[in-house]
Image (cartoon, grey):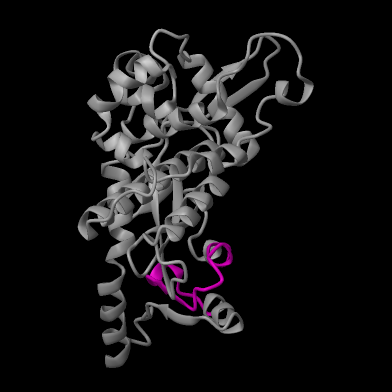
Amino acid sequence: MSSFFLAGAEAQVQGSPTMRLHALIDWQAIEEKLVGLYKREQSRAGGPEPYSPLGMFKLMLLGQWHRLSDVQLEEALKVRLDFLMFGGFDLGAALPDSTTICRFRHRLVAAGLDAPLLAEINRQLEALGLKVSEARGAIIDASIIESAARFNRTVEVSPKGQVSVSDSADAQARWVKKGKHYFYGYRTYLAVDTEDGFIETSFTKPANESETKQFKRLVRQLPGSVDGILADKGFASLENRRYLQRKKLTDFIQQNGHYRRPLEAWQKALNRLIGTLRYKVERAFGTLKRQFHLARARYFGTKQVQAQVHWAAIGFNLLKAQRKMERLQMQPARS
């Protein structure tokens, strides 16, 4: 970005929420993880120079934080100084269009970088003292994300009489009943730390897959410092409890009663205690759906939706870190 443009723009946008978030992170460490996304980096073939992978990744974050489609993000980039500065683009230079943004997102998903980038952001927040580096407990939960596509069964008959049935443009989404309502989409799993509620890890599966069966995978993805797991009755099973015993992790999964075996008084008291601590993961889901617009997916396919959740989780953790800095009256280590 030209020094002339920086001189005029920096004073105007430096205090914006977007740039305050930008100041938290060592973006060079992020850039190192994005090396190799373009074949041209290896072949050094001719043709136009691709846009900076770091700048394109920052656009992914902006699109999620501000609920912008690729087309809307392209337009916003032309008129918002904070977007230009956040992405490192220069006013008057060629800017990425919606097709370029879409293609880069597919590159990130294909490379499987969404989870490693969330882990890198968390590592940096720990180094800054904003996130507890050795959280003793983790709270886990799952929530439904509706598909970006509506369920619409169509039947096509070829000239040769062959019949093909299609239920939706989103072939990996599935139906699930929750309470009295049916949902078509995915189920996202989160683990947050018990200290401040930062998102530790996440993954996404089709909505019809059992919560109980995903428990072990979620626990395996947690930091080694965690020694206790809090969860609701949806994860209660003898297999999961025995798994925690083998891992020497404290079992704080809520007790699940049965009409032939009602809960005892101590079990009800334990459930109430766990319930008072679980608000942190419920609050995380609430913020992701309300502020980061995850009530409904924006893309088709499990991997694409999972990446969307990870981008939103990065935004959630950065926002939480920024608010913690303001509460503690800390100054960003970077500008």
Image location (x, y in percent) of residue 179: 31, 56
Residue extent of the magenta highlight: 216-238
Q: Is residue 179 visible?
A: no
Q: Is residue 139 visible?
A: yes
Give the vertical position of 132 relative to 35 (above or below). Answer: below
**Residue located 56% across and 19% down the image:** 51
Does residue 331 appear to the left or right of 256 in the view shown? left
Q: Nearer the viewer, residue 10 or 209?
A: 10
- Residue 236 forms part of the magenta stretch: yes
**Residue located 30% across and 59% down the image:** 282
Image location (x, y in percent) of residue 203: 51, 51
Q: Nearer the viewer, residue 277 or 271?
A: 277
- Residue 23 forms part of the magenta stretch: no
The image quarter in which residue 60 lies: top left
Give the vertical position of 236 relative to 86 (above or below). Answer: below
Image location (x, y in percent) of residue 190: 43, 57
Image location (x, y in percent) of residue 97: 47, 13
**Residue located 36% across and 37% down the image:** 296
